[in-house]
Image (tube, rainbow, N blue to C red):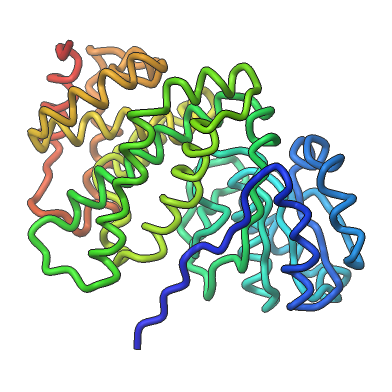
């Protein structure tokens, strides 16, 4: 038996007006978990739309998507009283909310405050240690029930998150096509890989203008379309494909690069992944797509070389490459990738213009 639940979402400047109506199917008692900045940015538009619900608890989730925060929240008796949870914030907040809901057996609704990942709709949570280093991917029993997207809030958030979100989103198409190459796909995976173009083409076509508009806090059609690419299209792929097809070298290299403990303090997830996308395209000799993504990255300022990630050509990167080639994201790829192959692709990218 196949069960596939694609993202259910409401998007637009009036999206929050639907929250009470949609959530009441699951009860009346809501608990809110939120990022401090996200709550401050969204409360004026959000809180009046929650009048039809009984808010039994509200709390800042913490500052890291870690088991320390999850375990603390799971033990909170007020959260146990709720019929459902509403997560309000960025990816880490939503990932924590999803795991807490999973452990408590509570439905989860999401209100993303930034467009940097597809965490608002997916069936996984990326968990970290308390120091911010990666710990594991937590697989949930179910995805969030419904996502409410107000593009005005996202357009008024720091533009760097939207910028990094574009980089992470384009990787979903490049990696899913690569990792599924030569396989006979079932319907769900074929569907997911096919629609992954919605993670890629709209950003290459509209991303530069959308980024300029977000920097000016303008909600244009381009901004709205790219938000949906980042959150909904990427989430649809993640929910549809065999998990083997969700990532490949771009994310494996991301995890490799983050063995340098300062990397994630200085650079955003999608920013680092976008560099890995270029390395993967070059290694796989997809020169036409490499040209397109490289030119896009240059236009919007996403990384195109080691210097952009505060690394140098002279750095041997042995620790980075050792971690990259053993990463789980390379468990299912169309041909073996070695440390020397990645090193060679990185070196060639340094000379690419």
- Image coordinates of residue 13 in percent, x first then y, are 70, 42
The C terminus: image quadrant? top left
Q: In the displayed structure, would residue 80 be above or below residue 38?
A: below
Residue 90 in the image, given as x and y percentages of width and height: 63, 43
Is residue 189 depicted above or below 255 in this figure? Answer: below
Q: Is residue 56 visible?
A: no
Q: Nearer the viewer, residue 145 or 18?
A: 18
| Image quarter of the N terminus | bottom left
193 is higher (above) or lower (below) than 189: above
User: As drawn, which residue projects farthest toward the bottom?
Assistant: 1
* Left or right, residue 49 beside residue 209: right
The image shows residue 230 at horizontal and vertical percentages of 47, 43
Residue at position x 33%, y 29% from top? Answer: 204
Q: Nearer the viewer, residue 78 or 163?
A: 163
Q: Position of residue 345 (x, y in %)?
A: 14, 27
Please say whether residue 168 is visible from this viewpoint. yes
Q: Is residue 300 left or right of residue 210?
A: left
Tell me: residue 255, above or below residue 295.
Answer: below
Residue shown at the point (48%, 47%) measured from the top left: 134
Q: Residue at x 56, y 39 (%)?
A: 115
Q: Residue at x 48, y 39 (%)?
A: 225
């Amino acid at each position: 038996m196949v069960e596939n639940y694609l993202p259910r979402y409401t998007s637009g400047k009036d999206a929050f007006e639907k929250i009470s109506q949609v959530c009441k199917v699951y009860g009346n008692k809501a608990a809110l978990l939120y990022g401090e900045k996200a709550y401050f940015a969204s409360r004026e538009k959000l809180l009046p739309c929650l009048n039809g619900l009984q808010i039994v608890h509200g709390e800042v989730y913490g500052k890291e998507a870690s088991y320390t925060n999850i375990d603390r929240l799971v033990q909170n008796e007020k959260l146990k009283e709720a019929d459902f949870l509403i997560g309000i914030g960025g990816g880490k907040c939503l990932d924590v909310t999803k795991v807490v809901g999973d452990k408590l057996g509570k439905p989860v609704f999401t209100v993303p405050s930034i467009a940097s990942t597809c965490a608002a709709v997916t069936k996984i949570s990326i968990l970290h240690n308390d120091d911010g280093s990666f710990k594991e991917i937590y697989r949930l029993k179910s995805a969030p029930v419904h996502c409410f997207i107000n593009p005005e809030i996202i357009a008024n958030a720091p533009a760097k998150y939207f910028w990094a979100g574009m980089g992470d989103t384009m990787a979903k198409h490049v990696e899913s096509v690569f990792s599924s190459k030569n396989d006979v796909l079932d319907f769900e995976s074929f569907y997911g890989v096919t629609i992954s173009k919605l993670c890629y083409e709209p950003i290459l076509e509209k991303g530069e203008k959308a980024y300029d508009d977000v920097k000016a806090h303008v909600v244009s059609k381009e901004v709205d379309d790219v938000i949906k690419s980042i959150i909904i299209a990427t989430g649809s792929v993640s929910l549809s494909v065999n998990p083997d097809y969700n990532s490949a070298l771009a994310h494996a290299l991301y995890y490799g690069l983050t063995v340098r403990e300062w990397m994630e303090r200085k650079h955003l997830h999608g920013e680092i992944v976008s560099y890995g996308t270029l390395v993967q395209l070059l290694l796989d000799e997809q020169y036409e797509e490499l040209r397109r993504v490289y030119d896009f990255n240059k236009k919007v300022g996403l990384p195109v070389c080691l210097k952009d990630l505060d690394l140098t050509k002279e750095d041997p990167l042995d620790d980075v490459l050792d971690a990259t080639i053993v990463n789980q994201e390379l468990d299912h790829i169309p041909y073996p990738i070695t440390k020397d192959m990645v090193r060679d692709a990185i070196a060639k990218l340094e000379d690419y213009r």
